[in-house]
Amino acid sequence: MSSEEGQVHSRLGIRLNKICCIGAGYVGGPTMATIAAKCPHITVTIVDLNEARINAWNSDSLPIYEPGLDELVRSCRGKNLFFSTDVKKGIEEADIIFASVNTPTKTQGVGKGRAADLRFIESVGRTIAQYSTRSKIVIEKSTVPIKTAEAIARVLTANETSGGTIGKKFWILSNPEFLAEGTAMKDLDAPDRVLIGGQVDDAVQVLVDIYANWVPRDKILTTNLWSSELSKLVANAMLAQRVSSINSIARLCERTGADVKEVSRAIGADSRIGPKFLNASIGFGGSCFQKDILNLVYICEQFGLNEVAAYWQSVVDMNDNQKVAFTHRIISALFNTVTKKKIAVFGFAFKKDTGDVRETPALTVCDMLMADGGIVHVYDPKVSYEEAIQEFKYHGIEVNKDQFIFSKTPAEAVDGAHAIVVLTEWDEFKTYQYEDFYRKMMKPAFLFDGRNMLDHDGLERLGFEVHALGKASSSASAADEGGGYITRACSSPNMRSYKPQKTADGMLL
């Protein structure tokens, strides 16, 4: 298959001992660190124009938190894992190049609010074309809409040459990530599957051989490019669908007296359904689920599949409504106003074991509480005040610093608070001495469990008025039509209604 001691592919003419990854983010960093650890014979360089981010990767304080990542980076960095801002050198020295840059939802122009913004991935293609002096395999690692590889290929093939025995050629592969933040390192170490899409078997086999250093061959799936690109969007859409589905049933449980935990256990015991992603919550967040579903909606509309688009749009609509309904319930239970009331919020990250706040449900909840005059005190073990503020700014939300405060400890957050609101399922939240918290809080002391993770019966015995998801509240003060969520607008004139609406083109307002 190769010559020169196995370093150059005999047919493609590419060097096999070096990898360059463009993009040092949540996907590129952990993925390349794993490849470096599993393939000590391959030199891996991650390049990024963001100097501060590269400096963080080269420091003792990595730019992202992921359990197990620190140890892995330390074991490889400086040996066969390198981080650099020299993009040109990285492309010149490696013939296997991963593109792992952000593909956010467009904020303006055609497809605004739904279509993927591909300017960064297009820029990567042009940069590779600019600095390449020989043939390359270019691998899409970013989440992209179907047919993106075709666009990248057009940019690259326009720069191909036919001189010499093989000339300069580019082969495009799709290798979507299926990582869950918080368990990404485990997912990389023992993946359910690795998906590789491509049109040229030799190029596909190069990437197969890299993963085969630690992944069983039967778990490495190969498809054409388009199936691989679409599979990533569909995987996230299906998972998000389960979240919205069980949350819709949780709302029904609150009106009927059923318990969503018991319903989840019952249906999850069916082997055709399974128990995963059946925990009622305030909704999904993160960088992928909503972005990918809206992208899927847009693609369906472009092909005239309006009924299909509407189906997937409803998954996002239900998720938005869940966050709004949960917050209305908090305000209603607190005597229909939280003005000048201290509210302790446990968790701002979109899920446990990560510091990622992108599209976190906490954003909507905190914003609505502050809009009604509440004073929000947040405690999160991994999220900083600056990171939270940056996410508010990204969504165009101005924050009054007197209403949004980060606490150093949970005890500080609850001291004098009217309510505790659990928004992230951090395991440590289960270990707290809530009896001590109760003594420090205003009475009646409320607790709203947006993750259904705490011992509700035990908390009620301590004196808390507990409001859980998918279960009718025992308190008459929270009842409305049988204990369900209060979804009417609150009394404060400053309160945002947050009722998801659509414009004529289907965009969410």
Image (tube, rainbow, N blue to C red):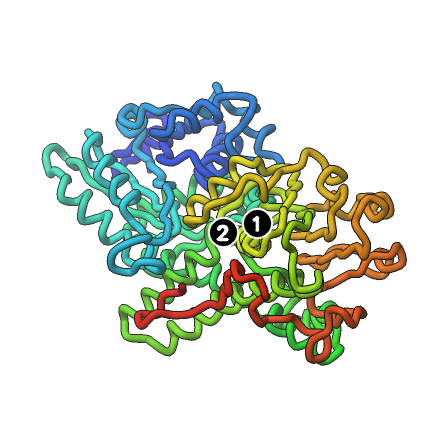
Q: Nearer the viewer, residue 241 or 35?
A: 241
Disc on the earlier residue, 2 or 1:
1
Name the element at disc 1.
loop
Q: Residues within 10 Å of mark 1 (few under 14, many from 20)?
A: many
Q: Position of residue 67 (x, y in %)?
A: 62, 37
Instruction: Point out the residue furthest to the left here.
Output: 163
Q: Residue at x 53, y 64 (%)?
A: 319
Image quarter (top left, top right, bottom left or bottom right) of the N terminus: top left
**Which three-letter amino acid code belongs to the residue tagged 1?**
Phe
Can I make out residue 3 in this image?
no
Q: In this orientation, which residue lies closer to the viewer: 271 or 402?
A: 402
Q: Which disc number belongs to residue 350? A: 1
Q: Position of residue 79 (x, y in %)?
A: 48, 20
Q: Is residue 98 above or below residue 324?
A: above
Residue position for label 2: 359
Asked where in the image residue 160 lies, by quadrant, the reply is top left
For the residues labelled 2 and 1, say whether their Cβ atoms are less than 8 Å apart.
yes
Q: Within 10 Å of the Cα at label 2, are there few (<14), some (14-19), or many (20+) other Cα atoms?
A: many
